Each structure stands twice: as C-alpha cells, then as structure tokens.
Image: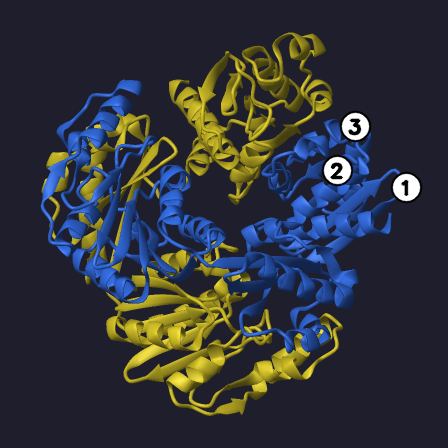
Chain colours: A yellow, B blue
Amino acid sequence: MLAEIITIGDEILIGQIVDTNSAWMAKQLNLIGVSVKQITSVSDDEQHIIEALEAAEKRADIILITGGLGPTKDDITKKTLAKYFNMGFRRDEGALDMVRQIFKKFNRPLLDINLQQADVPDGCQVIVNKNGTAPCMWFEQRGKIFVSMPGVPYEMMYLMDDEVLPKITSRFQLPSIVHKTILTANIGESFLAKEIEHIEDCLPAHIKLAYLPKLGQVRLRLSAKGNDEAKLKAEVNDFAQQIIDQVGKYVVIDEDIPLEKAIINIMKEKGLTLSTAESCTGGYIAHLITQHPGCSSVYWGGAVAYAYELKESVLGVKESTLTTFGAVSEQTVTEMAEGALKNFGTDYSIAVSGIAGPDGGTEDKPVGTVWIAVSSKKKTVAKVFNFSNKRIQNIERSAASALMMLLNILKEA
Amino acid sequence: MLAEIITIGDEILIGQIVDTNSAWMAKQLNLIGVSVKQITSVSDDEQHIIEALEAAEKRADIILITGGLGPTKDDITKKTLAKYFNMGFRRDEGALDMVRQIFKKFNRPLLDINLQQADVPDGCQVIVNKNGTAPCMWFEQRGKIFVSMPGVPYEMMYLMDDEVLPKITSRFQLPSIVHKTILTANIGESFLAKEIEHIEDCLPAHIKLAYLPKLGQVRLRLSAKGNDEAKLKAEVNDFAQQIIDQVGKYVVIDEDIPLEKAIINIMKEKGLTLSTAESCTGGYIAHLITQHPGCSSVYWGGAVAYAYELKESVLGVKESTLTTFGAVSEQTVTEMAEGALKNFGTDYSIAVSGIAGPDGGTEDKPVGTVWIAVSSKKKTVAKVFNFSNKRIQNIERSAASALMMLLNILKEA
C-alpha cells in the first residue's frame, strides 16, 4: 500500500515555514504499514495542484493532502478538489455545527466566510474537525483514496490519530513494515560502514540498511517489509544483534530515540539526577530533555545564565573568575557545572559557555568557541570546541557535544 | 526563473527526519529572485529519482538536489545522475584533495570508499565542499541547470551561500521578488480578512496576499514580482501601510520576524530587561529568545525549575504555596514570576507552570492545564489556559501564549 503526501501553500515554497507535517504523517503511516512514496509541496495554484494530484494518483493508493483550507481567498484546495473530481458543493450540517460551536467557544462574531467553511465537494465524506473550522474531506474515486486536511499541525494530528489512520487500517489488509534503529556515536559513517560491510552484504532484498549521520552521531536503520510481522521482527533483530556484536562499543542504544532520551533512560535506570547550566545554548539543552515525557524523575532543572549577574548569583561563579578568565573559559564553565551540581543538588550537571555569534568573537576566542563541562560528585571534565560561524548550528552542535560528553562519562561510571 | 528542490533520502519518507533544508533553500532562492515551483522528496530509489528529475526538468530552469551523496551503499544519487545524463565517471583532483584534508584534520583512517567520494560524473563541474567529503556537482544540460549537494544541513548551507547562489546570480538576469510581512495577534484569520477585504480587492495581479495563522498569531504576507525592484517595494509598502492603517491595533510588527524577536526589539528600544522562570516549557521560551543574535542586552537568563526544590531555592517559591495550591496554580506561578523578577534583577519576567502531559493530569487539572504569569515592577498578571493532550503542542502553545501576554503588557506600558 503506497501513500503520497501533498502539502499545499506558498508559505512552504518561499521558505517562510518548515513543513513539519509531512515527517509526522510519514512516521504514522509507516507504523500502520503504509509506505510513503513521495512528498510533494506545491503552491496555492489551481493548475499546479491538479498536476500534483494527477501524478500522485498514478503512483499511489492513498493521497493525503494538507493545507489551503483556510477561509481566506488565497486558500483554494477545496475548490480545486471539486474541479478535479468534477463535483458541485453542498453545505455539511456536521461541519456547520462545529464552526458554530468553535465561534461560540471563543466568543467571536460568525461571518459569512466562516459559514462557507462548511461547504464541501458533494461527493466527499466529511470527517468533522473538532479543533478547527476546516473539515477533513475523504474522497474515494477511481479506486484511490484522497484525504484533504487542514495544514495547522495540531488539527491535522488529531484528525490523523483519531480518524484517518483508524479508517485506513480498517479499510485495508496492510503489509507490515518493521524498522530497527541503532544509535552510534564516536565513529565516522564510512568507518562504521567498513566495520559492518560483511553483515550488510548478507542482507536479503526485503531488508534495507541506511546510515543517518547527524551532529557526531550515526543512526543505522534496518527496514524490512513483508506480510509476516513476527518473522520480519525476528530477522531484523537478528541482523541488529550482529551489528551490535560487531561495533558494540560505539552503540549508544538500539532504539529510534534521540541522544538525550537515551541518556534519560540510562540515568533513570541508575536512579541518577541531572541539572544544566547554560549560557550560549540558552535553554536548548533543557528544552531537548524536557520534550520527553517522564524526564522529570531525572532532570531537576537548571539555569539559563546569559548575564554575568546570573552566572554569579544562581550558579555561584566567582566574579574574579569572570573578570580574569572571561565567561568563555575552562575556569568559568567548570565553576558553572560545579555550581549547578551544588546549588541544584543533582548527581550530574552539564555546563556550556561559548560564543554563539554572529557577534562577540575575538582573535583569541572566535565565534564558535565553546567550553563544555560535565560534573559529577567524583570529578569535573571540561573541553573546548571550535564550531562554525553560524549561531543556530553552534547552539545545536554545543548541545549535541555536551550530551555526548555526559554519555561518555555515564558509560565510564 | 523557476527552481525546483528535490530531496533524496528514505529517512524523510519514513518520517525519521524533518526536511529543514528545503525551507532554507527556498528562502535564499526567493531573496535572489528565483521562485520555487515545487519541493519533492523521493526515496533512495533509482527509478524514482529519475522520474522526479524528468518531471522537474519539464517545469523548472534550475533543479537543486540534496541528499544521497554519502559514502555508503544506500546513497545512490551520484550514480543515478550519471545514468540520467548518460555520463561516465572521473576522479576529481580538487575533491580528492579535500577528502584527504578532512581525514587528516580529524585524524581518521582513509578508506577506499572515502576516496570514491571524489569520483564524479564526467560531464559535471565540481564545486569543492570545504565542510565534508561529498563534493557539490553542477550540471548544465539541455539548457537547464542541475546542482547536487549533500543533505547535511551545514554543508549544504555553506555551499549555497558561498558558491551556488552567487553562481546563479552572476549567470542570469533575475526578476525581483519583494515580500512584506505584517505580524498580527489577538484577531482571528477570517475577521482580519473581512477587515481588509476592500484593500485585498484592489491588489493588482502581480501582488498576492497570504494569511499564515500560527498559535494565535496571523502573519499577512504581501508578495510582488516584477522587474523594477524599487517600484515593487513602493507598491508593497503602500498596501502594507493601508493594512496597518486599517487594523493597526492588532499589528505586532511589520517585519517577517517571530514574536519573540519582535519583543526583543521592543524591549531593546525601551532599555528593558527580561528573565524567565519555566516549569512545563522546560527552557523552550529561553531557547526561542536566545536563538536570536543580540538578545543578550534584553534577556538576562532564567531558571528551568522542573523540581519543587528548584522552584523554592532558585525562584523563592514558598514550600507552603507548593503544598497548599500545587505547582500548577495561580499562587505558584505568581511567586515564580515575582521570584524571577527579584532574584534575577530584571524589569519583566515570564513564568510558566503547567501539565504538559501525557501523564500528571488530574480531574481538576487535566493535561494541558497551564498557568502563565508576567511580572513587572508595577504588577503581576496571571492567567490559566487549557491546551491539548499533546506534550509538544502544550509546550509550544504555552510559550506562544506567554510571549503574547508579555507583548500585551508591554503595549499597555
């Protein structure tokens, strides 16, 4: 069963927003055994939308469409779908009721264009959207399924979870797709490939291996497709075990979770607690950790100490350290980590202080210079890194490196 | 001049990574006057890549391709491009030199598959990639340009900024594309549309207006295309001014910047300082603010107070408040905000405490219950919100709502 995703909206094509919907949808579809063949982003242009629909209809069985369902004139998806399927319009009572409820809840005046949100192509089935005024529309035409959903992420997510995915599952006999991911660190992609070449060469045609490098980590992903889920799982697990046996010392975890989640799991198991003291990463490490449910038994919190004043008052960094060595120094980052450990009462702490840029660099300490320290009751380890001249990258790479340092110290312990 | 972007990689189609490259590339292309017609994500599959290339070649003048250039077996973009253009391979000396330099720098053993990174289709021009082993390849065929770049974001970004964009600009007479964005808040999309309907109706064909709603804000984007940049700018500014005159009280800022950046600008201008006290947003507000260069003159830092202990020790929340009213309460969030103001010595502070979920909800305080407070020397305002049952959404919506509350209080002052 093949699906395609079409996202509609000029804002994607001019780069004003990043399309996060497609990745989320693709992940959910894969979990129920539907492969995504292609993701296509097109503009709010009738002819272009029709071309994309035609091309997708040729390749896929299910076409999921997001975006272009707002009440304003630039949104033309509904009109275009009616034209594509040669349908007229009808006003849907369920959708109308939802529009009225939402406007009542937010106490906003109900305009004519809001009522028009309940007008749908007359050959579609309406799935009521509980979180917005644009209904979800389900078309079955020429043996294919087309589902049109709003582009607002949380509206689309509710509709997919509660309505669209269950409907697809109940409608088709789906093959199984099994993925297994192994997160590795401290080893380059090509060196890793060489180490496991003999395993890769033995993979049968229905199992694929992919290498996904990111910020000093490489994810290995085994993907298998077939009808017998139990057999696929056994096969994939067997190959995964061969890989782990071969390159075990580089393996962080054999789950498809990010590094910080792997660390939370390891620390939770050992009953350890963590705090953070962030300067140039400005809360990004804390955010990475606190995205994950259940982090609170490990992560107690921390400080975002941007100003000198907070480094001193909250983390106990000595004024003389800051004035003698500067905020971006081994001495400061060490005091930040040790201050967090002491003041926040945790077993481990991470501290980061660097020059994220674009300003603030000097000859000695150019933009991208970042000191990172990890502290435990036993010791404090500090290390300097030289990243790039791009602010966001420096923040991301600092966070990844800090987490890697913590992981390596946890592994030693 | 039309461009298309093709991203290659199974990891996108199974939803393992979000494609952030395309939005960035589209933005840069628009800035130099190249419109992006379509963004297409396809798998690491030869036939599928060729179909995508054929379709893009029909529609666009420039085709930018990312991904599938790694040294491992799952990466087949280079081989596929050679097949598509019917070319053989040659080893490129410049690319080979860069591979050698990079392996020397990281002190890693150089393998045969790494040397093969310097093999390129013999009809392409190589642009050396200073940040990675996969060279950028520039093809001019049948009157069209094809550029293949690695999918690693920072490698692609350097190549685009330093090489590809300047090459496109020097090669073509490009039309101008002018965008102007107005950020509005506290008004719904359809109500806004009705307010400015008469302005929208007067827009000439070469100027488009789009509505981009997100987390309680609506961005209005005017886009004009033509040859006379100065004239386009004047026209767009004139329509923007008409809109601002009409709905001025909802306008946050007339720039394409996020809400937190608008707040930094307003506070910087007034010489005001800000701190944060985050529980359920876990550093996300701090991260949003510190993404932006120059935030340090406004933002001094804050606490991520996940555990009760940190709420008490760092923010000065009374133990009795926590035990009597709970961490998610008007009383606690008020003490958090006032504690931040006092302990961190800033003019304004934001505090957030809520139940992000999926666990931790009760009948009285279900998942999605979030208390937010904004404090200044004059007063503290606290408000409760009821968001969703999805953790990431609750974090994002809490942050957006907290920033909105701060903005509204800044506007009053």
The quarter of the image holding the N terminus of chain B is: bottom left
Mark 3 vs 2: CB contact within 8 A: no
For the residues labelled 1 and 3, the Cα–Cα distance comes to 16 Å
From the viewer's side, name the closer residue of A16 and B177: B177
Residue at left 53%, top 70%? Answer: B206
Identify which amino acid the numbered label 2 is placed on: Lys
First in sequence: mark 2 or mark 1?
A: 2
Q: Residue A164 in the image: x percent, y percent?
A: 42, 71
First in sequence: mark 1 or mark 3?
A: 3
Mark 1 vs 3: CB contact within 8 A: no
For the residues labelled 3 and 2, the Cα–Cα distance comes to 21 Å
For the residues labelled 2 and 1, the Cα–Cα distance comes to 19 Å
Dot 1, crowdedness within 10 Å: few (<14), some or many (≥20)?
A: few
From the viewer's side, name the closer residue of B176 and A262: B176
**Element class at badge 2:** helix
Q: Is residue B249 above or below residue A257?
A: below
Q: Which quadrant would residue B116 be assigned to in this image?
A: top left
- Residue that carries the numbered disc 1 in the rendered image: B378
Q: Residue B383 in the image: x percent, y percent?
A: 78, 53
Mark 2 vs 1: CB contact within 8 A: no
Residue B343 got which mark? 3
**Element class at badge 3:** helix
First in sequence: mark 3 or mark 2?
A: 2
From the viewer's side, name the closer residue of B365 and A80: A80
Q: Is residue B338 left or right of residue B21?
A: right
Residue B268 got which mark? 2
Q: Is residue A120 above or below residue A25?
A: below
Q: Is residue A264 left or right of residue B155?
A: right
Identify which amino acid the numbered label 1 is placed on: Lys
Q: Which quadrant would residue B389 be assigned to in this image?
A: bottom right
